């Protein structure tokens, strides 16, 4: 059955009806939270559509997985690590993260970073390695 989650947030603090908020407490994560916007609870068997928010000075976990990602930066700026390379990204930039590529986002500037992330909805979505 199809589902609509209506937008209820504001720029810099995005939210959608029915989206489950989650703080991330993995080692090395600073100021990151997220929401599953579309997933198994909505009947999506093939993908998960998520929103992440990283506070100024914060970062996501340094990790790699067996699956790939599609990322769209909505607001803020970040330094993203892809493998051994580093890039600066901002609003409307799209990022493809290949399977097994080490990756991490570090917020740049005084505004929170917000991005959408799409991944496959499969049982193999575990973190393979977390970098120290």
Image: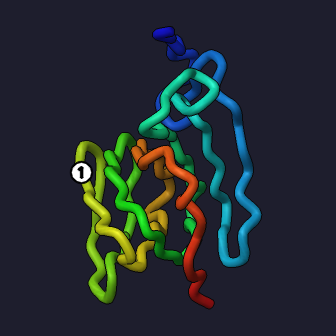
Question: Residue at 51% of width from left, 37% of height from top?
Answer: 12
Percent x, y of residue 9:
56, 22
* Residue denoted by label 1: 94
Q: Nearer the viewer, residue 62 or 100?
A: 100
Residue 128, given in percent of the width and then of the height, sits at: 56, 77
Q: Position of residue 126 (x, y in %)?
A: 59, 65
Q: Foreground residue, 126 or 73?
A: 126
When the figure is inspected, residue 117 is found, relative to residue 28, above or below; the finding is: above
Q: Quadrant of residue 88?
A: bottom left
Total numbered badges shown on the rendered structure? 1
Left or right of 123 on screen, residue 25: right
Q: Relative to 66, does residue 91 appear above or below in the rendering? A: above
The colour scheme used to paint the residues is rainbow
Does residue 6 sit above or below 40 in this rendering?
above
Q: Where the C terminus falls, by quadrant?
A: bottom right
Residue at x-position 42% and y-position 74%: 103
Residue in the picture at 43% in, 39% down = 47
Horizontal and vertical percent position of residue 98: 29, 68
Q: Is residue 84 left or right of residue 45?
A: left
Element class at badge 1:
strand
Disc 1 packing (10 Å; few <14; some 14–19; many ≥20): some
* Side of 124 relative to 95 (left or right): right
Q: Which one is nearer the viewer's eye here, 43 or 72?
A: 43
Where 54 sits versus 115, above or below? below
Q: Residue sitting at 55 percent across and 32 percent down? A: 39
């Amino acid at each position: 059955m199809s589902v609509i989650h209506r937008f209820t947030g504001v720029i810099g603090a995005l939210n959608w009806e029915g989206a489950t908020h989650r703080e991330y407490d993995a080692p090395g994560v600073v100021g990151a939270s997220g929401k599953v916007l579309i997933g198994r609870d909505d009947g999506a068997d093939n993908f998960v559509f998520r929103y992440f928010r990283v506070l100024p000075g914060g970062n996501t976990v340094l990790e790699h997985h067996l699956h790939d990602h599609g990322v769209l930066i909505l607001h803020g700026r970040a330094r993203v690590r892809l493998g051994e390379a580093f890039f600066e990204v901002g609003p409307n930039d799209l990022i493809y993260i290949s399977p097994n590529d080490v990756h991490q986002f570090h917020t740049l500037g005084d505004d929170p970073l917000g991005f959408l992330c799409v991944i496959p909805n499969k049982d193999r979505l575990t973190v393979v390695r977390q970098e120290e």
